[in-house]
Amino acid sequence: MSMATLNILLPTPSTNSHYFNANYSQSSHNVYFNTNNNSNNNTKLHSLPCSHSLPLLSSLFVQTKSNPSHKFSHMPTHLSKSEALSAGTGCSWMQNNSMLQSGEGCPDLKQGLVCSAIPTERAKVSSVQDLFEFICSGPLIDKMGFSKEKIGNSIDKWIAYNSYLCRLFQLNELYLTIPQKVRFLHYYIPVFLWCEDKISQHVSMFKDGEDIPPLVIGFSAPQGCGKTTLVFALDYLFRVTGRKSATISIDDFYLTAEGQAKLREANRGNALLEFRGNAGSHDLQLSVETLTAISKLTKEGTKMKLPRYDKSAYNGRGDRADPSTWPEIEGPLTVVLYEGWMLGFKPLPVEVVKAVDPQLETVNKNLEAYFDAWDKFIKAWIVIKIKDSSCVYEWRLQAEIAMREAGNPGMSDEEVKDFVSRYLPAYHAYLPTLYSEGPNGSDPEHTLIIEIDDGRNPI
């Protein structure tokens, strides 16, 4: 049976409508959309016939009429302010979607605004076959070993995950732009499925009854490339699919303001250690204590607080946030998403780093202690690869301009140039080895290297 293209006449939205709850009846193969969470106000749409080759939405992933209390039926309808703030900047792919209240997708997201501009005209929705073909055209599919048969058998999951991401980023899934489809279906969802596979392999290593520590997945990626937003999306997908996850960044382990001042004083004249960022500016003891404690969150009721860093303190110089503000996490954890711009960097011969920048010699020496403090805890790796480190400056500049245009404090162009210049020597020295050999101590079988273009999309 061939796939059908739906022409959907949307009901007039209420002022509180933010997204559509899809109801699917397997017996009649009819799709319903509810705009106010009231099952008595469903508007029946055109029938969507089921294909013999591709399964449609199943009751496991979408609320059904017969089981309206399914655990996936009560997910958050939009971002809270704190969640929105953690999504980061540089979200140009989110713009120009009819769900957004303005063309400035990222500022709206960062401010946690509720978007209720739902279109009322007919919308043409791609068939499942079109969606299947779009997914199969993604650049990561072959790299991850996803066959067309495997994708076809799990198409309901792809549809459900895409719907969850639309909800998270406050986008109308009926009007996704090509950049938005690429970001979700060619990037975020494939990476999520890769992580799910590594979690399954990790769990299989333990016997029944044994405590299973969470799998720590490291994300090594340059600043501005979108790693924080990727991790934010993955964390949400884990939560809505019933897994307990936690996120942490190498930024959370920066020295206190006092510790940073001592580091600066001890390395006068070394611009790479004047401010936070490079190896030497982190509290490695705090790293070990935190990552060790996380690994013990294997039982119900076990809890701990994750350290956080306040980059706005001391006029932007930064300081460790007050422990009373640190978020609390509870076991049993399944996965920890650990991200940072220099995760997995390996110390190099002195002559190599000095040829890049003499100031790197001290940084390189400091880096020797980072494997035991960071990298040895990471059992699976995702490396975001860039062609040219000059992208870091462009991306950071875009983010700061967007912040200023949104009325938020942001660095000037000259300040951005100075800021990035303190990281570029490390990029020039360590990225080639990271890309050719993988992160420090990594297993190639559990390492995914994703090359991205200037638009931050996989290629």
Image (cartoon, rainbow, N blue to C red):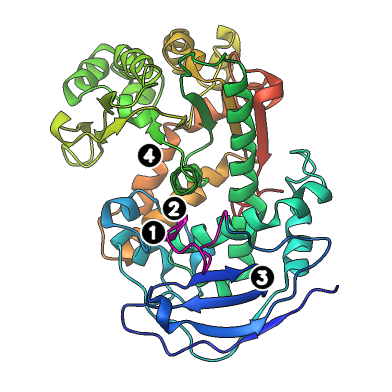
Q: How far apart are marks 2 and 4 (CA)?
A: 46 Å
Please say whether residue 298 is visible from this viewpoint.
yes
Where does label 1 land, which residue?
A: 74
Q: Nearer the viewer, mark 2 or mark 4?
A: 2
**Which amino acid type is shown beneath numbered disc 2?**
Lys
Where does label 2 land, which residue?
A: 71
Q: Where is residue 67 in the image (x, y as percent from the top left)?
A: 49, 62
Where does label 4 land, which residue?
A: 419
Q: How crowded is mark 1: few (under 14 residues within 10 Å), some or many (20 or more)?
A: few
Q: How far apart are marks 1 and 2 (CA)?
A: 7 Å
Q: Nearer the viewer, mark 3 or mark 4?
A: 3
The circle drawn on residue 27 is: 3
Left or right: residue 262 versus residue 165 is: left
Span of residues in magenta? 60-73
263 up-or-down from 98: above or below: above
Which of marks 4 and 2 precedes in the sequence?
A: 2
Q: Are marks 1 and 2 in contact (CB under 8 Å)?
A: yes
Left or right: residue 415 versus residue 180 is: left
Q: Are marks 2 and 4 in contact (CB under 8 Å)?
A: no
Q: Distance between the residues labelled 1 and 4?
A: 43 Å
Left or right: residue 175 versus residue 416 is: right
Q: Quadrant of residue 41?
A: bottom left
42 up-or-down from 459: above or below: below
Extreme right residue here? 1
Q: Quadrant of the N terminus?
A: bottom right
Q: How far apart are marks 3 and 1 (CA)?
A: 23 Å
142 up-or-down from 201: above or below: below
